[in-house]
Image (spheres, helix red, strand yellow):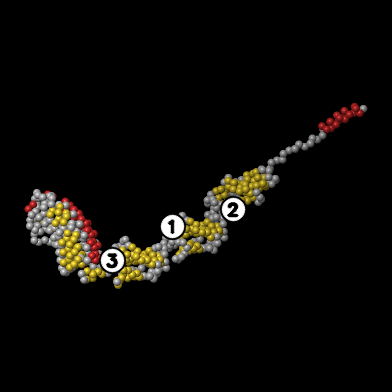
Amino acid sequence: MFKRIKPLLLFIGLVIWSCATPPPVATQPPIISPTVSILSPVNNQTINEIVTVVVETKDNDGIDKVEFYIDDSLVFTDLESFYEYQWNTIQYEDDSKHTVKVISYDLSGNSTISEPNVYVIDNSTSHPQGVNIISVSYTVTEMTIEWEGATDQDFKEYKVLYSSIEGGDKDTLISYSDKSSTTHILTDFDPAQENWFWVDVFDIYGLSTLSGGMTNEVDDAPTSSDLYPISLNDEFQIMWSKNNNDDFGSYKLYQSFSEDMSNQILIYETNYRTDTTFVLSVDVLKYYQLVVEDIWGIQSKSNIEIGDYEIKLWGEHYSIVNTLELNLIENQLTGNIPPEIGILTNLTGLFLSYNYLRGEIPSEIGNLINLTELHLGHNGLQGEIPQEIGNLVNLTHLSLWDNELTGSIPPEIGNLSKLTYLSLWDNELTGSIPREIGNLVNLTYLGLFNNELTGGIPSEIWELKNMEFFRLENNQLINDIPESLCELDFNWSNTTFFNISNNQFSPPYPECVKEYITIMIPPFVFN
């Protein structure tokens, strides 16, 4: 019986099991991303300085982080609530627009991008209040820059800027973080030039306002001293007025042979302002000038004074400065011409004719560069004509006739381009006529007769067109006489003025002079 019931029970059990409620099937929970939005600043707002970008974000699973993007560039990641970013806007140009967005991530790695906000930057009214420079002043030891104090509460620092020119590049000298510090002192400076300064005021946000520039007043040249007339008492006593400038540096005394102080040399220097006298041994005529220099190297010059003294010639005293003409014609002078005569450099006329002077013409006579007339005729002067005669470039009259001069005519005479009168007759001159005489284009009187000159007449002589007196007779001149001689406006029949007779010229002679080649010397000449 049990065996028959057992299959039945098994069948009934299977039916009951198949009709039971099935167990629940497992399902995935839905994905929920965080919500995120920018609370402030609001979209399209104009912002400045440092603004706080505030974000609101929520998620059922919790927030992991929030990323902040400006113009699609990640600038900050915030890992803790509250989610904010301190955005410094001073790096951007005014009126520029910038887009800000954030991305919020939950703990499951889900993320949401916020709606972007656009902001306009305007820091034009956010810069700190600028300051003005009050003064740039200096003493002999320091230069002081003073400016107004800043008034803004967000003050950070002053920067003092410098340039040697107004429009030049500015260098930072120093920074001051103390708002009450409104002066800066320099000990290394040069007031002889412009020194430009600016003060740049910075706030805590990094914004700044630059002041206008100011420079020092450029230091004036020191007050010049007056150089007093130089007195002579065995020595030169040179004195000048005292300089009273605060920045006095030194006196410098210069001397020169020239009235314009060219080629000057320093003969005395002192740093003592009360030292206003210098004693100098008498030497030769020189000019003097005092230079006052301040401690910055700026100079001023005094008037020019001359060290005058007297020399003794033939028993008389003559001022070096004031002797402009020495006329001793027919004064029974004897002996040599003293070389000291070359000290009278202001001479314009020296007249020593018709005396009994002997010896050589001193070479120092070449120092008399202001001479226009030199007359030494009818003496007993000997030796050669000094070549230093060629230094007398202002000479118009050179008269050395009727002496005992020997040697050749120095070619340096050709330097005397202003010469109109050249009288060397009645001497013992030898050698040839220098062709340099042809340089004397202003010559009207040429007297070389009664010498021992040899050689031919230089062709350059015939180019002198202004001749009114031309006499070369009684020499030993040779060679042909050119036919072009007749083209000159010479009246050869007037032998008192035009004469080349008694030489050794080779015939044939030009038609205009052939009857005058051997004519007797006239008894009268002009000197």
The answer to whether residue 147 is visible is: no
* Of the pair 353 and 37, the residue shown nearer to us: 353
Distance of mark 3 from mark 1, alpha carbons?
A: 49 Å
Please identify the quarter of the rendering in which residue 6 is found: top right
The label number, if any, that marks residue 288 in the structure image = none
The disc labelled 2 sits on which kind of residue? Val
How crowded is the residue under tag 2: few (<14 C-alpha within 10 Å), some, or many (20+)?
some
Placement of 398 over or under 26, stated as above or below: below
Distance of mark 3 from mark 2, alpha carbons?
A: 87 Å
Residue farthest along the bottom direction in this orientation: 233
Quick check: marks 3 and 1 in contact, CB under 8 Å?
no
Residue 398 horizontal/vertical position (percent): 18, 61
- Asked which secondary structure carries label 1, the reply is loop
Placement of 274 over or under 149, stated as above or below: below
The disc labelled 1 sits on which kind of residue? Ile
Q: Quadrant of the N terminus?
A: top right
Q: Quadrant of the C terminus?
A: bottom left
The answer to whether residue 84 is visible is: yes
Question: Which residue lies under the disc numbered 2?
Answer: 51
- Asked which secondary structure carries label 3, the reply is loop
Horizontal arrangement in the rendering, residue 193 relative to residue 201 (left or right): left
Quick check: marks 2 and 1 in contact, CB under 8 Å?
no
The label number, if any, that marks residue 284 in the structure image = 3
* Residue at 68% over, 45% down: 107
Judge depth for marks 3 and 2 and give the one in front: 3
Residue 26 horizontal/vertical position (percent): 75, 38
Please tell me which of labels 3 and 1 falls first in the chain: 1
Residue 313 horizontal/vertical position (percent): 22, 69
* Residue at 12% over, 61% down: 526
- Asked which secondary structure carries label 2, the reply is strand
* Of the pair 471 and 55, the residue shown nearer to us: 471
Question: Which residue lies under the disc numbered 1?
Answer: 165
